[in-house]
Each structure stands twice: as structure tokens, then as C-alpha cells.
Image (cartoon, rainbow, N blue to C red):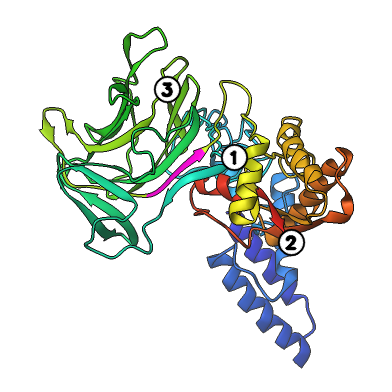
Amino acid sequence: MKRLALIIAVLLFAIALPTNADAQGFLKKIGKAVKEKTTDRAKESVDNAVDNAFDAVDDVLTGKNKKKDKKKSKDSDEDDEDDAEAPASATWTCPNPDCGHKGNTGKFCDECGTKRPDNVPAEAQYEQSDFVPGAVAFFEDDLKTEQMGEFPSKWDLIDGSADVANLKGFQCIHFEPGSRIEPLMTNQKSYIPDVFTLEFDFWMNDPKTELSNCYELEFKDEQGDDVYEIRIGESYGKLEVTCRYRSTADDWRDSGGGKTWEMKKNDWSHFAMSFNKRALKIYVNNKRVINIPNCKPAARMKIHQAEWGGFHGNNNYVTNFRYAKGAMDLYDQNVTDMDAVSKAISESGKFVTNNILFVSGKADLKPESMEEIKKVAEYMKKNPNVRFEVQGHCDNQGSDKVNDPLSQQRAEAVVKALESLGVDGFNLRAVGKGSHEPVADNSTEAGRAKNRRVEFIKK
């Protein structure tokens, strides 16, 4: 009835027009626009008068004003129709670690514009990741330069067999049931520091069509004795992660048993862990799944194609490994020490950190960022003749119109903070890079977290 009343109103308006040639042309244009509007209200028209007519009739019929711009803006991420359809009780918390806004009901976060994750119930959005990658990598392997079918050059084989493969567009390590591999390091018995992070991507089959994958990470001390074992596998179509560990009280305990999470089937998933002296946190696809407060530290790690539920699973595939020094503490962010800053600059000519944080959508530094900036300032004051370009980088959430100036302002905020700590501003140049130079996949939250960074480039 509402649409019919609208059409009648527009036709009556047209009949009242003069019948000269110009009016006839105008009538044809109005008629065409009305036809387009009745089939697709959201479609843009060449005649803004029709939009005004729609809104005017709506106001008369409903007795209230409505938003006149239903088109989703590239800069604002608003979606009125999605917001209207969402039930009031279906609230969700923003997964953006720089935001965390609670009570969202629409398709996008009300505070920062982050999109609500697909296929996840709104009421389940309380599991926000606090993972921050370590600042200085001591082992990385994306396998992009490896030769297909050969054993990966940065790894060592303990049992079974493994080779380089390509799965769904990613170079990866393929290892068969029962096989064990570990990173090839200078000191093979002890290379894991007591504060570190580990990340990699792993493949999971669809259990309805293929045997399940099962992965076991065996962490050992220098003598080769088990310290903790992390298992990742399928359980009744869901992903199950468990950890058996030796506590600081020197007894064996289990964590994570019986709890399952939604599994990406026939797709890559992301594993991450953070260890700080005794605190072990485990994440899958940006959700923290295990939090152990007191665990003994390890010195080395092996990846095992493990037995799961009484049988060996299907072939396993892993890629994009990154071991790094630095991790999250139980409550506060662990700060990179000055030696790590110096080492990174001497080895690569730059220091990259994800530990400098800002208020969401602003260039205001969070208080916890100052500890990291102090370490950088300490290095710069000990090297007063070295000049640096301070680069601000964003993820791809939001438009370039917003991100480009924001990244510039954030870089300037870091420069200002360094100057306040006694660094010579003559040696500093702030540059905003926006989201134009990503170092990770922006389609995942873990990747976006890596892309939100500050780089200090030696010049």
C-alpha cells in the first residue's frame, strides 16, 4: 500500500505539469526513474527529485523522519537495513583489539567500523584476542622460495617423511602420519627463550569427506624431556585443542579437554601461542582457547603428526612459521628490551613493533605504549648521529581517506613522544603509510593485528 500511494503521488504530480515539449521530456524521465525505483529502491537514479518524493511520502505515511541517505558510505561503514533487522538482544563485541566496543547490534562496529565476523553468532563475540606477536623474529619460514617436492631447507627431520607442497595457493610443509619435524637451529637442543611467541598456519580437512588432521606440538627441555604438549584435531566436526603440561609445581596437568570450537573445513587456520616465563596462552583463529598461568619453560619444539582418538589422521600441512622474542604478560604488555631494538636495527636496518598502541580511530597514544617508546628512545640517544624515518601503518579497515591522514598523525605522535624523552627531533621524520604496505593478510584479524604497526627505518 505504501509503494502504491507513492506511485499515485508521483503520477498526480506529473499530470499537473504543462503539456509542452519540455514537460513531456521531463515526464518521460520521471516515468523511467519511478520504474527503476519500484524495482530497486537502493539503485541510484539520475533524478534526485524522485528520492525526495520517496522520503516525503514516507514522512507523511509514518509520521516520522527517516534517514535520507540509505546508501552505505565508503568512509562510514553504516548499514541501516542490517541494523534494523538485527534483534535488540543480538549484541556483539568488536573483535578489533584496539577497540573492543561492546553492545553492537548491526553489521559493523558502532565505534570503529570493524565488520562483524561471518558465521559467528552475535552472542558469542565475547572471546576477544589479546595476542600480540613478539617484536624480534629469530625463526621465520613462509616456504615461498623452497622447491616443490624437496625437504624444506630450514627444517630437520626426526621421524617419517616430509616435503614441500602447494595447497590452495600456499607453499607449505607436507608430512605424513607419524612424522616429526623441527626447526633447524644453530643450537638444536636449546633455542627457545623464556619469553616468546609462535605462529603458523595449519590445514584442516572436512571430516565428512576425508580423514581428520591431527597435530601435536612437543615442547621439551634441554635434556629432551617433555614439558608441555599441545594437540590440535577434529572432534565430531569441531576443532578441539588440548594441552598437557608440567606445572611450576612439577606435576602434570591437563587443560582444554572437552571444549571445542568451530572448525574451518578444507581451509587454513591460524595457530598462535604466547609464553612469558611461566604464563602460556594459546590462540586459534584469533580466539584464545587455553590460558595456563603456571607452566615450566621449554627449550625446543617438534611438530608431530599425532595419533588422535585411537587412529592416525590424514596428511598434515603447515606454513608461515614465525618464532619471535617477546610476548604478552599475564596482564601487561611485555616490553622489548633495548638490546632487541639494537639487534633488529643492526641486522635489518629497522625496528618493527606492534606494541605501540593508539586509542581507536585517534592518534592518541595509549599509556602502555610509552614503555616501548622509552626503549627506542634509549637506543636513539645512544646513537645520536643516526637518522630515522618513523612510519605509521594501518590495516585495511576503513577508507584511505581516513587511514592515510590517521597513520601520519600517529607517526607524528610517536615522534613527539620521542622528543619528549630527549631524542633530537632533527633525526626524526614522520611518515604515514596508511594501509598501502601490509605485511600480512588483511582478511584475518591476526593479519590485521600485524599490519597495525610502527616501523623505525634507519636512514
**Farthest bottom residue in view:** 21
Is tag 1's residue or tag 2's residue first in the polypeptide sequence? 1
Q: Position of residue 337 (x, y in %)?
A: 65, 34
Label 1 to label 2: alpha-carbon separation: 33 Å
| Residue beneath the point at 27% across and 46% down | 156
Residue 322 is one of the magenta-drawn residues: yes
Residue 215 higher or lower than 227, as above or below = below
Compare marks 2 and 3 and give the one earlier in the sequence. 3
CA distance separating discs 1 and 3: 30 Å
Q: Which residue appears at 60% of the width and 36% of the height?
A: 97
- Please name the residue that numbered disc 2 is placed on: 459
Q: Nearer the viewer, mark 1 or mark 3?
A: 3
Q: Which residues are magenta?
A: 320-324
Report x, y in % for residue 392: 71, 53
| Mark 1, residue position | 96
| Closer to us: 36 or 289 | 289
437 vs 26, left or right, is left
- What residue is pinned by disc 3? 297
38 up-or-down from 234: above or below: below
Is residue 446 toward the left or the right of residue 435 in the image?
left
Amino acid, disc 3: Pro
Provide residue 42's location: percent of width, then percent of height: 60, 62
Q: Secondary structure at mark 3?
A: loop
